[in-house]
Amino acid sequence: MSISFDLTIEQESVRKEAYEFAREQIAPLIAEIDEKDDSALVLSIHKKMAQPPYSYTGIWIPKEYDGTPRSLLENCIITEELAAGGLAGIGVVIIEVLGVGVALPILIGGRQEQKRKYLPLIARGEAFGSFGLTEPGIGSDAGALTTRAVLRNNVYVLNGRKRYESFAHIADFNVIFAKTSPEKGAKGISAFIIPKETPGFRVVERVPCIGLRGHQDEEVELKDCRIPKENLIGEEGKGLKYALSTHDKTRTSVTGGFIGLARAALEEAVKFARARKAFSQPISEFQAVSFPLTEVAIAIEAARLLTYRAAWLSDRGERHTVETAAAKVFASDLLIKATNVAIDVHGGFGGTKRFPVERMLRDARIWVFAQGAPNIMKLIVMRDLFKRLEPPQSLLNQVAARG
Ligand SMILES: Cc1cc2nc3c(=O)[nH]c(=O)nc-3n(C[C@H](O)[C@H](O)[C@H](O)COP(=O)(O)OP(=O)(O)OC[C@H]3O[C@@H](n4cnc5c(N)ncnc54)[C@H](O)[C@@H]3O)c2cc1C
């Protein structure tokens, strides 16, 4: 079978459209969003994203629920361009959190009535949700979450606390993960839909972040929060499965965003290096300046290949957890390096508000932890590596003999 590295005409037009959207609708607002940590401006972008021809709020949702579904590969193309053209990560966060975080668990596990009720609203941008998995005491080890849901007389009563529930203060509803059977550990986690203003659900704290400003680390309290039995997504005990299947998809597309932001940092740095003179020549003439930029350019190509392969596997209906984790961890390193190099190249200017690279570095510093820290991505790849490569008996004998 042949391999093609070209985008199709359709994919190329998706790419161009996303880049132009980001240039026109995100880049002009980004300094103000960052300065004011303004979620109203973020919502204004979300509204525009929902409109045709973009319809980005529906890219994960099937047509029968008013969605505009795209392949995961197209999704990655879009996220790369939103970050590259928008000079920031927030455009991707809008899609990932407001559209996807809640749409996918409902799509993957939800009952028909839940899909019919929520998915068209999300797809049309008329409502959006937030995703509550992380807690004050747990992040990477999601299976250890402690929020409880107890069924009494056809009503679930939830108690616990969530942390880092992005956009919870403006969400129309929340997908909350809680334990229905704590004795079963990770297999006792279930997912629930909690509409806003449900008594007992309260955003107790909004913590501004170093980067991706416009979204926030929000702490949520569930205190005797009562919801009807029908608000359980799918089946009891399958909540973590829905969350992890969601992450398999969104980790791939968020990686596209990392590549886009790395590209934006590289482009800013190359332009600056060619314009700025020191010792009577452009600083790009110094290899100490141009080699790190070249390394970033190479890593961008490599990250894109890893990401496209993971997306391609997904689009063929194959498992891609390991490939996605490899792409995400590689692109995380790339993003941190690209934004650091961009600051170095800008010298003292790099740390000032005169240039966008300081914001890119702040976005990078926090973004790499979203949907799974880089170390956790390495764990996924490492486990697969060590599972696949059994030492042969002859080597075991040889090593034992030497020991
Ligand atoms: C921009 C952004 C948006 C987010 N939005 C949401 C959201 O909407 N909803 C939500 O539920 N959560 C959200 N999160 C939370 C995110 O999922 C967590 O930050 C992430 O899972 C990591 O958890 P933690 O921050 O608690 O880190 P911890 O799990 O406490 O880890 C701290 C450090 O220890 C390392 N570590 C932990 N375990 C291991 C191990 N076994 N081996 C090696 N190293 C390890 C980690 O790599 C990390 O460096 C968001 C995070 C960010 C940054």
Image (cartoon, rainbow, N blue to C red):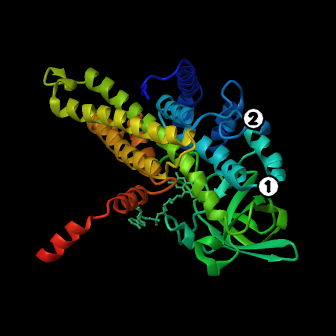
Instruction: Specify the farthest residue to the top.
Output: 9
Quarter of the figure with residue 268 = top left
Label 1 crowd (10 A; few <14 / some 14-19 / many >=20): some
Instruction: Specify the farthest residue to the right.
Output: 153
Task: Say whether residue 53 is visible.
Answer: yes
Instruction: Specify the farthest residue to the bottom.
Output: 183
> What distance separates the C-alpha of mark 1 from that of mark 2?
17 Å
Quarter of the figure with residue 183 = bottom right
The secondary element bearing badge 1 is classed as: loop
Residue 372 image label: none
Q: Indicate whether 102 appears above or below 30.
A: below
- Give the side of residue 149 with respect to residue 139, left or right: right
Percent coordinates x, y for residue 135 in the rendering: 58, 67
Quarter of the figure with residue 72 = top right
Percent coordinates x, y for residue 41 in the rendering: 64, 38
Q: Which quadrant is the C terminus positioned in?
A: bottom left
Q: Is mark 2 within 8 Å of ligand 1?
A: no
The secondary element bearing badge 2 is classed as: helix
Amino acid carrying mark 2 in the image: Lys
Residue 111 image label: 1
Residue at (46, 36) in percent of width and height: 308
Label 2 crowd (10 A; few <14 / some 14-19 / many >=20): few
Residue at (65, 73) in percent of width and height: 188
Q: Indicate whether 220 appears above or below 260.
A: below
Read off the residue under disc 2: 63
Q: Earlier in the sequence, mark 1 or mark 2?
A: 2
Instruction: Say whether marks 1 and 2 touch (CB < 8 Å).
Output: no
- Give the side of residue 289 with respect to residue 116, left or right: left
